[in-house]
Amino acid sequence: MIKPIAKQFHSLNNCLLISCFVFFFFSCGNETDSKQDRLVFRYNEHKNIGSLDPAFAKDNADIWAVNQLFNGLIQMDDSLNIVPSIASHWKIFPDALTYSFKLRKDVFYHKHHLFGTDSTRQVTAQDVKYSILRISDTKLASPGSWVVKNIKSIDIISSDSLHISLNTPDPSFLGKLTMKYCSVVPREIVEHYGNDFRANPIGTGPFKFQKWIENIKLVLRKNDTYFEKDNSGNSLPYLEAVAISFLPDKQSEFLQFIQGNLDFLNSLDASYQDDILTSKGELRGKYNQSINLIRGPYLNTEYLAFFLDSESSEMQSSLLRQAVNYGFDRKKMMIYLRNGVGIPANGGFIPKGLPGFNDSIGYSYNPKKAKQLLEQYRTETGNSNPKITLTTTSNYLNFCEYIQRELQKIGLEVSVDVMPPATLKDAKANGKLDLFRASWVADYPDAQNYLSLFYSQNFAPNGPNYTHYTNPIFDTWYTESFKLTDNKKREELYTKMDSLVMRETPIVPLYYDEVIRFTQKGITGLGNNPINLLELKRVRKN
């Protein structure tokens, strides 16, 4: 009888430990806690989360969380096909200006006392109209307002159907509707909380909001009434909960992952990349039994951006901006700093993999040309000792220090300033930085999304044009691209626009990224997609 008693005692200890863990994250103790713990998906968000309001889902950290809590009319699958979500089906009228949507009748909001007796209610066409018009409201100042600028009207046909009419045809419109900005929200809840809706989100997603201690943890619980099912008819999601921590240090994040305290890692940092990957970007042998590596194309361009409204003479000179583009070896940078993960950006801003990409319009390493341009700048401006300051976060410091060293070889003095991510985000949006590192991930798979960063009507902070680049020719072409329905002609126009931007050099493309994900061996169903959207509704934890 000794062994069975010891076994029972050991099992009791395990149950107590599991219960304590789940109580810490969920503040609820019951007989299902041990099951819940096994089904808690844990990941870290080192950049923090600014808001859980989809109207402000601008960065990946916010987008990932919002994606678990909300749904839009439509969504993208991992192959970037547009598929149903709240809308069961839709059609496009022959004029290419009107879109008709029919809603599912089994989509309900997460429970909240403001809904009344049933604590929930069905999503209606009026909710969709309110949600889209809300992000266009100038008083809200949503960074996603540009997404719906082309909408002329939204007409309610019935409680479960509506028509959206555009001012001009836009072949990318359905792709834009998949963006998290266009998530459907309940008016009565939004108006009740006002600005505090950011921390009291009520949506229709596979997970519902449980707790958010900012900078510490965010906990989401399974939505037991979620409408989507798997191919076998089983209800989604499979997980009981999602627990997100906010460790700011990527090395600490990596250690937590290796120790099994995190289920997922979506980063490649200099502090650990050589430990986990070979120089060819493959998983090292010691991790083959415990870790899965998922790798694939990523519609993300990493770049440096010049703020063109700066009073600095260096920022105003295309000669100096071109010298920076010619002045460092991108291929060498990728081999030594990224273990070969990513593609050197010798093309334009449009990443490889999207129609419009052209690898002949950018810059390759040419230190002789860089020195000539720098000398020409000195002669024309009388500034014999040009200096620039490059601002970054600590996670990208190695890239910026590499560029600093290379540019100093051609005679350009570079200082590197390091800021916390939130500080840099605010500073770049408000024009406080002359030169900064940034990235742009495709919101929808169309090069128009990338080119929107150079349209003069999209100046930050109310749009994504952080450089304040402006060119009337570019603006004309950008507007024209909305009207073209011929894909070949649109692709050619995109290349022309990208080429014009690169000639005037408001940016320095660094590399076109790849999605690289690490999971514990027990995680299945995570998948991968070129926009690096985190989908957890089909994830299983064994």
Image (cartoon, rainbow, N blue to C red):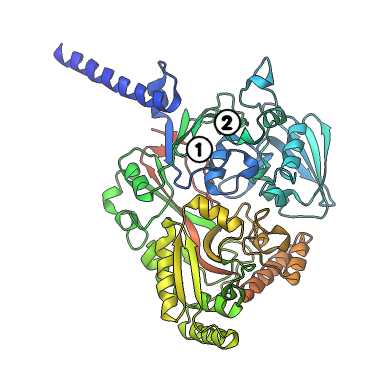
- Tag 2 and tag 1, C-beta contact below 8 Å: no
Q: Amino acid at mark 1?
A: Leu
In whole angstroms, how far apart are the C-alphas of marks 2 and 1? Answer: 13 Å
| Quadrant in the picture for residue 178 | top right
The tag on residue 536 is 1
Taking depth in this image into account, of 452 and 490 the one nearest to the observer is: 452
Looking at the rendering, in which quadrant would you find the N terminus? top left
| Quadrant in the picture for residue 158 | top right
Residue 159 image position (x, y, % from top left): 79, 29
> How busy is the neighbourhood of tag 2: few (under 14 within 10 Å), some, or many (20 plus)?
few
Q: Amino acid at mark 2?
A: Lys
Q: Examine the rendering and report whether any part of residue 239 can be seen.
A: no
Residue 186 image position (x, y, % from top left): 69, 30
> How busy is the neighbourhood of tag 1: few (under 14 within 10 Å), some, or many (20 plus)?
many
Q: Is residue 127 left or right of residue 360?
A: right
Residue 140 image position (x, y, % from top left): 70, 43
Residue bearing mark 2: 229
The outermost residue toward the top is 1
Taking depth in this image into account, of 227 and 444 the one nearest to the observer is: 444
Residue 80 image position (x, y, % from top left): 60, 50
Determine the secondary structure under disc 2.
loop
